[in-house]
Image (tube, grey):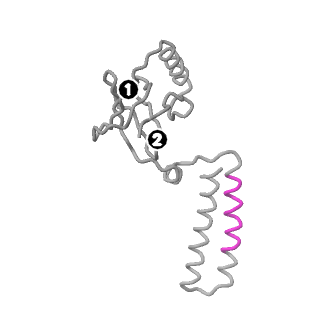
Amino acid sequence: MGFSNWYCVDNILSFSSGKMESIKQVFHQHFNKGVDLLIKCIDYKTFESIGETDFVPDYGGFEILHNDYTYSLVYTVDNIAFFEKKKFNIAIENNFSYHPPKVGQSEKYQQIREKAKEFAYLIDELAPSSREKSLAMTNLEQSVFWANAAIARNE
């Protein structure tokens, strides 16, 4: 289970654009010299081998996604890089993250709320007070929530 092709910088996560350029430059300098030294990658907590790679930048904040895990560089010593391994699930990351409104989304949220409010008044007028009416209102609120969440999470 090695980290083959880590040097494909376009697949690396969590870099600012300024650091990305310097990493590319360092990478090209590294390989243009013909250096053929592999860096051992070790799990920081278990000390198990993760694999080997051709290149790891020598500063904190480096993170890569591999086989449903993120590996964050903790530190390097000589030709050994220690990484913290964390489970990564794109759906969990998306569902439990803040999604600030994008242009036009607030209007969509408002449209959904207005239509739901019209329907809520219709239910309130026609349905007798009961457990079922209460559930209908609760589920209507949930429908509004999930419709808005669909917009926030997926646009």
Magenta-drawn segment = 106-120
In contact (CB < 8 Å): disc 1 and disc 2: no
Residue 39, percent from left and from top: 38, 26
Q: Is residue 115 magenta?
A: yes
In the image shown, does 10 or 108 lie closer to the viewer?
Answer: 10
Is 36 above or below relative to 143? above
Q: Which residue is mark 1?
A: 39
Residue 128, percent from left and from top: 62, 87
Q: Residues within 10 Å of mark 1 (few under 14, many from 20)?
A: some
Is 107 above or below relative to 30? below
Q: Which residue is mark 2?
A: 66
> Marks 1/2: CA distance?
17 Å
In the image shown, does 66 or 155 lie closer to the viewer?
Answer: 66
In the image shown, does 13 or 5 lie closer to the viewer?
Answer: 5
Task: Determine whether, in the image, residue 81 is placed left or right of residue 26.
Answer: left
- Name the amino acid, label 2: His
Q: Is residue 86 magenta?
A: no
What kind of element bears circle 1? Answer: strand
Which residue does the image show at 47% across and 16% down from the upper left?
Answer: 30
Residue 119, percent from left and from top: 69, 73
Q: Quadrant of residue 140?
A: bottom right
Which residue does the image show at 47% across and 40% down from the upper left?
Answer: 65
> Foreground mark, 1 or 2?
1
Which residue does the image show at 55% across and 21% down from the upper left?
Answer: 21
Task: Give the mark nearer the N terminus: 1 vs 2.
Answer: 1
Is 137 above or below relative to 147? below
Disc on res. 146 = none
| Residue with the most extreme left position | 46
Which residue does the image show at 47% across and 33% down from the upper left?
Answer: 4
